[in-house]
Amino acid sequence: MTQAKLSADVLIDTLRIFELNNRSISEAARQVNVNRTTFAHRLKTAQALLSDDRPQIFDAARWTYPRMISIDAPKTRWIIGSDLHVWSGEPPVIYKAFIAVAKKLKVDGIILNGDIIDGARVSRHPAIRGSAAPKIEVEIETAKRWLKMLPNAQHKLWTMGNHDLRIDSYIASNANELSNYIISLAEHFPAWKFSFAFEINQTFEVRHRFRGGIHGAWNNTLHSGINIATGHTHQLQVTAMRDRNGSRWGIETGSLADPFGPQFEYAEGAPSRAQMGFAVVTFDEDGRMMPPELCEMVGGRPVFRGDHVL
C-alpha cells in the first residue's frame, strides 16, 4: 500500500511533539508510537517545509520546565533523595548521610527528587503566628550552601516539586511584570539540570509525585509501566511488581528533612508514615536496573547496607 502524503497538520504536530519532548527524536517517536527512523523522516520534512512557522510552533509547545529529559547511562550508579524542605541553619543528619554515601559510592548521578525548597512564606496555607519561617532568599542561599557539600557527579538532576514551584508561582502571581528581571529558581542553581521528570536508560523514571496513599509505590509502577521513583509522600519504601515481563520497582524516596522539623508544624506532630531516608539505584552494562537499595534511620542513626553511615 502506498503511504499517504503527510498533511500540514501532521507536520505541525510533529514539530510540536519534538519540542514537547525536549527535542529528543527517540522520546518523541515513543510518544506517537512510531519507530525512530519514521519520526526522524517526518521531522526532517516538517523542518524543511515549515521553517517560517517553527518559532511560533515551538513557543506554543514549550513548557516552563521540560516535561521529561531522557538520559542514556548504562553501567552507572545513582543516589536519589527528595523533600529536603530547606529551612535554615545546619542540614539534618540524614542529609549528611546522603552526602557521605554519595562520596563513598562515587556515584555517577545525583538526583534531587523535588521539594528541595520549602517556601513556607509564600505558601497558600495561612501563616502561624510566631512562626520563624525563613525568607525565600535565606532558603535559597542555605540550599546553595548545602548542595555545595555534595561531591561532584557527571549527572546532577533536580525534578521540580510542588514546593519548588512555589517560588516561580509567587513571582508570576505577584510580580509578573518584573518576571524578566527576577531570576527563576533554576537560574539560582546553574549546575543542576531541571525537569518535571527524568528517564534513565529507558527503563527508569524519576518524578516528584504521581500516585499517593499507603500503596503509592505499587500504584506508581503499576500505572507507569516502568521502574519509577517518586517523592512527595515522605514515605520510604520499595515495592516489587512481578509479571511475565519480569520485575519492576516502585520506589518512594522518603525525606531528607526531619519530619518533626518546624517546616511541618502544620501537621501538629501527629503520627505519620514519613521516614527519613533516600535510595540508591544501579544499572548494569545493558542499562538494566538492579534491585534498589535504601538508607534509613535506625535507632537514631542512618544505616545503609547493614552498616551505620555516621
Image (tube, rainbow, N blue to C red):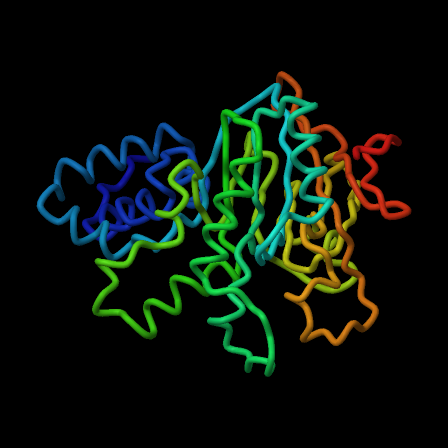
Q: How many marks?
A: 0
**Is 68 or 177 nearer to us in this picture?**
177
Q: Residue furthest left?
A: 52
Residue drawn at x 88%, y 45% is 298
On the picture, is 124 further left or further right than 215? left
Residue 250 visible to an observer of this rendering: no
Q: Is residue 177 left or right of residue 95?
A: left
Q: Considering only vertical position in the picture, is 243 above or below 64? A: above
As drawn, 254 above or below 78: below
Nearer to us in this view, 47 or 56: 56
Query: Which quadrant does the C terminus fall into?
Result: top right
Regarding residue 106, the answer to whether it shows in the image is yes
Quarter of the rendering containing residue 151: top right
In the image shown, does 190 or 253 lie closer to the viewer?
190
Where does the image place residue 199, in percent across and percent down from the top left? Answer: 53, 38
Q: Position of residue 282 (x, y in %)?
A: 68, 27
Q: Residue 209 at x, y = what percent? A: 60, 57
Report the front residue among 18 and 104: 104
Residue under the point 56% across and 43% down: 146
Q: Quadrant of residue 15?
A: top left
> Which image quarter is the N terminus in?
top left
Q: In the displayed orientation, state which residue is furthest to the top.
A: 285
* Residue depicted at x 55% and y 52%: 116
